[in-house]
Amino acid sequence: MKKFFFVLALAAGLPLTTACTKSVQRAERDVQRAHDQAVNNIERKQEELQDTKRDAEDRIARKEERLQDTARQETERIRKEERALDDAVRADARRHETSETTRRTETTAPDVIPTVP
């Protein structure tokens, strides 16, 4: 009789053991799925971060190019203004030179020798 109860207990416990095994397997699958999902999320976030870094680097490069272009344009504008100023100074010097020569010519009496009749 003891053997009968023992076999009966084993027979009754077998489905419980099978159910526990299935439950453990399901939990293991859930843990693995959660792990895989976490890895995928981390990789996606890393890719997004790299994209953001590239975009930021591109924006910075474009701003640096615009800054260099502006510096070049302003340098050229200053050179043109300096040339215009130099030209104006030279023209003014020429005008003064010409007017001084004209004044000297006008103020100096021509060498006239009076004729005696």
Image: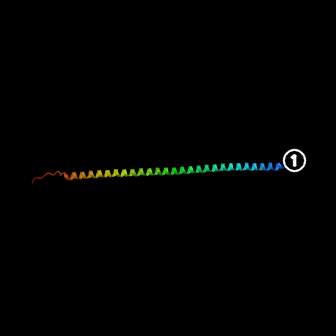
Return the x and y of residue 100 as percentages of the image width and height.
24, 51
Task: Tell me if 67 is positioned left or right of 17 in this view.
Answer: left
Return the x and y of residue 93 as percentages of the image width and height.
29, 50
Task: Tell me if 56 is positioned left or right of 82 in this view.
Answer: right
On-image quarter of the C terminus: bottom left
Q: Nearer the viewer, residue 80 or 108?
A: 80
Q: Residue at x 87, y 47 (%)?
A: 5
Per the image, the residue denoted by label 1 is 5
Mark 1 is surrounded, within 10 Å at the Cα level, by few (under 14), some (14 to 19) or many (20 or more) other residues, namely few
Q: Nearer the viewer, residue 59 or 23?
A: 23
For badge 1, the amino acid type reads Phe
Return the x and y of residue 6 as percentages of the image width and height.
86, 46
| Dot 1: element | helix
Task: Tell me if 86 is positioned left or right of 45 in this view.
Answer: left
Return the x and y of residue 39 as percentages of the image width and height.
66, 48
Q: Residue at x 59, y 49 (%)?
A: 49
The residue positioned farthest toward the top in the image shown:
2
The residue positioned farthest toward the front in the image shown:
1
Q: Residue at x 70, y 49 (%)?
A: 31
Q: Nearer the viewer, residue 25 or 101?
A: 25
The residue positioned farthest toward the right in the image shown:
1
Task: Tell me if 36 is positioned left or right of 116 in this view.
Answer: right
Q: Nearer the viewer, residue 66 or 18?
A: 18
Q: Residue at x 84, y 50 (%)?
A: 12
The residue positioned farthest toward the left in the image shown:
117
